[in-house]
Image (spheres, rainbow, N blue to C red):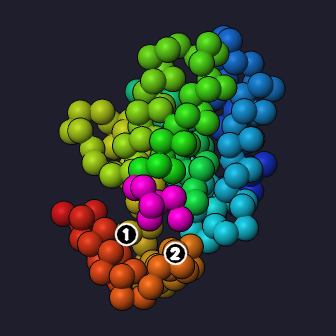
Amino acid sequence: MSERLTTVGDILDHTVPHLAAPHLKPPMARHVAGGLAERYREPWRRHHAVAHLGDVVGFLLENIDDLENPRAALWTAIAHDSVYVPQLEVANGGLNEELSAQATETPLNGRLADAETTQIGDHIRLSATHKWNGEDTDLAYFLDGDLKILGAPPDEFEAYDENIREEFWFVEQDIYDTERKRILRGLYD
């Protein structure tokens, strides 16, 4: 997929055919996915916004033939940052991901197979640490898509870095610098 997905409408247009299931018809899939995707437009978001969602979804669509379960991978991508409040991250790392998983599992329960809904929730929760288990290739593709900004050209990475700082405006600079280095080093390692 060469076109960049920059709006919630574009994202939904490209994903809904892959999100639907026998008990989740396209209109309902669009409704549920749209509710999750709209959250990426919250005013405090700088990096974890619609453009990021479009990048992650676009990456998965580019690699869709390599995914074992494209539907689960795309639901994971759409929902992974649906709850994103930086203050929650500082207070309790992983809470955003837990709440995002719950916000996704609830409307999908009974509409997708239980194992599929569980996989989506588990993959969202694993985005808190970005640790790959070495086996699940769909998880690897999702995590790669989520972190692909780390390999972006310098100007794009600098914009990302500035946007993350803006999201964490409330953290004192010296604490922010120490924690940011720790996080980036952990991802590098």
What residue sits 43% from the left and 72% below the top?
152
Callout 2: few (<14), some (14-19), or many (20+) C-alpha neighbours within 10 Å? many
Amino acid type for the residue under numbered disc 2:
Phe
Q: Is residue 65 above or below residue 22?
A: below
Answer whether residue 91 is magenta in the image: yes
Q: Secondary structure at mark 2?
A: loop
Q: Which disc is residue 168 wearing?
A: 2
Amino acid type for the residue under numbered disc 1:
Gly
Task: Check disc 1 and report the residue beneath it.
Answer: 151
* Quarter residue 179 falls in: bottom left
Q: 114 or 70, which lies in front?
A: 114
Q: Is residue 124 above or below residue 58?
A: above
* Quarter residue 20 falls in: top right
Q: Main secondary structure of the magenta part?
A: helix
Sooner in the amino-acid sequence: mark 2 or mark 1:
1
Q: Which residues are magenta?
A: 87-93
Q: Is residue 106 above or below residue 147?
A: above
Q: Position of residue 45 (x, y in %)?
A: 64, 67
Mark nearest the camera among 2 and 1 is 2
Q: How many marks?
A: 2
Callout 1: few (<14), some (14-19), or many (20+) C-alpha neighbours within 10 Å? few
- C-alpha span from label 2 to label 1: 22 Å
Q: Position of residue 125 (x, y in %)?
A: 42, 41
* Quarter residue 5 falls in: bottom right
Residue 74 seen from this side: no
Answer whether residue 104 is magenta in the image: no
Residue 46 seen from this side: yes
